Structures are given as structure tokens and as C-alpha cells.
């Protein structure tokens, strides 16, 4: 379920959606200087990560969904473990979690968005980046 070849593998390990080997981001999601910065090409299969200009603007829809899922999770945890907690402390818990997790949510939204449009190709690294699929988005 989480093995190489699944979308979840690429998302959780922040790897290239096509080869699942090359790094997707310039640096760690919490490194301030490269926060959320996607590499131009995959270092392993030479896939151009940005399929079209402003491609990752669509990931804002994904980060909105992730933020809502985080909010609902915290609210459910509050209902189960702290039923007497007031709305002010709930809001504080949500704010703290959003502030601390926002770099990770931002990175996850971009790689999820990329995985929606780029398919895994198990033969891509054997052929040095040449494949019949996605040829137009591979660096020449
Ligand atoms: Zn790759």
C-alpha cells in the first residue's frame, strides 16, 4: 500500500511523481530559504516538474483541503479528549497547529498536486529519462 509505485510513496517521501527516486523539493520543508521550492527538473529522470507556467497555483486548493482536514481533526480530538475545553483554547490549538504545520502542508499540497497530473513509470530510470509517456515534459 505504501510501497514504491504508489502515489502515497511519492507524497510521503517527497519524491519525484514519475520515478519515485529523485528529490522533488530544493530542501527540507522546514528550511526557510527553500521552503516549498520545487526543483526545476528531477535529478534522476529529468522530468520537468512544472508542466506549465504557474502550474503549482492549483496546489492552493489542495492546501485548503489539508487545512480543513487539520481543523476537523483537532476539533474531533477536542470533542473526544477535552470536551470541556472552551472555544478560545480550541482556536489557540488550531492556530498553533496551523502555524507549526504550514510548511509541511505547503510541501504536501505541491507534491499531491504534482501526483494528480504525473504518473509513475517504473522503467523510466532504466531508460535514462526517455519514455514514450511524458516525452514532452522531459528535459532534452
Ligand atoms: Zn524522477
Image (cartoon, rainbow, N blue to C red):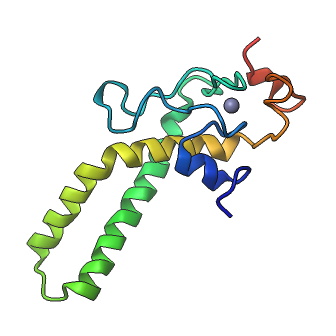
Q: Is residue 82 above or below residue 40?
A: below
Q: Residue 77 occupies which quadrant of the picture?
A: bottom left
Name the residue at 34% across, 42% down.
Answer: 103
Question: Residue 2's image quarter?
Answer: bottom right
Residue at 42% of width from left, 29% of height from top? 27
- Provide residue 129's location: percent of width, then percent of height: 79, 23
For residue 6, above or below residue 125? below
Q: Quadrant of the C terminus?
A: top right
**Within the displayed image, which quadrant is ligand 1 positioned in?**
top right
**Direction right: furthest residue:** 132
Q: Nearer the viewer, residue 71 or 44?
A: 44
Q: Position of residue 9 (x, y in %)?
A: 62, 51
* Image quadrant in which you'd find residue 21: top right
Which residue is rendered at x = 74% and y = 23% of the image? 137
| Vertical placement of residue 19 versus 92, above or below | above
Percent x, y of residue 26? 46, 26
Question: Given the current orientation, which residue lies at the most extreme top position?
Answer: 140
Residue pictured at 74% horizontal, 50% vertical: 5
- Counting labels gives 0
Residue 39 is situated, as x and y percent measured from the top left of the image, at: 53, 24
Decide if residue 21 is on the left or right side of residue 101: right
Name the quadrant of the N terminus: bottom right
Amino acid at each position: 500500500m505504501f510501497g514504491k509505485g504508489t502515489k502515497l510513496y511519492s507524497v510521503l517521501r517527497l519524491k519525484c511523481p514519475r520515478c519515485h527516486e529523485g528529490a522533488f523539493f530544493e530542501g527540507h520543508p522546514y528550511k526557510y530559504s527553500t521552503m516549498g521550492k520545487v526543483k526545476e527538473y528531477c535529478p534522476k529522470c529529468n522530468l520537468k516538474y512544472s508542466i506549465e507556467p504557474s502550474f503549482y497555483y492549483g496546489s492552493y486548493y489542495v492546501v485548503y483541503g489539508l487545512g480543513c482536514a487539520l481543523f476537523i481533526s483537532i476539533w474531533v480530538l477536542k470533542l473526544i479528549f477535552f470536551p470541556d475545553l472552551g472555544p478560545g483554547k480550541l482556536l489557540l490549538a488550531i492556530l498553533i497547529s496551523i502555524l507549526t504545520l504550514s510548511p509541511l502542508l505547503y510541501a504536501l499540497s505541491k507534491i499531491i498536486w504534482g501526483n494528480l497530473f504525473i504518473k509513475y513509470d517504473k522503467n523510466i530510470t532504466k531508460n535514462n529519462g526517455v519514455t514514450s509517456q511524458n516525452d514532452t515534459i522531459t528535459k532534452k
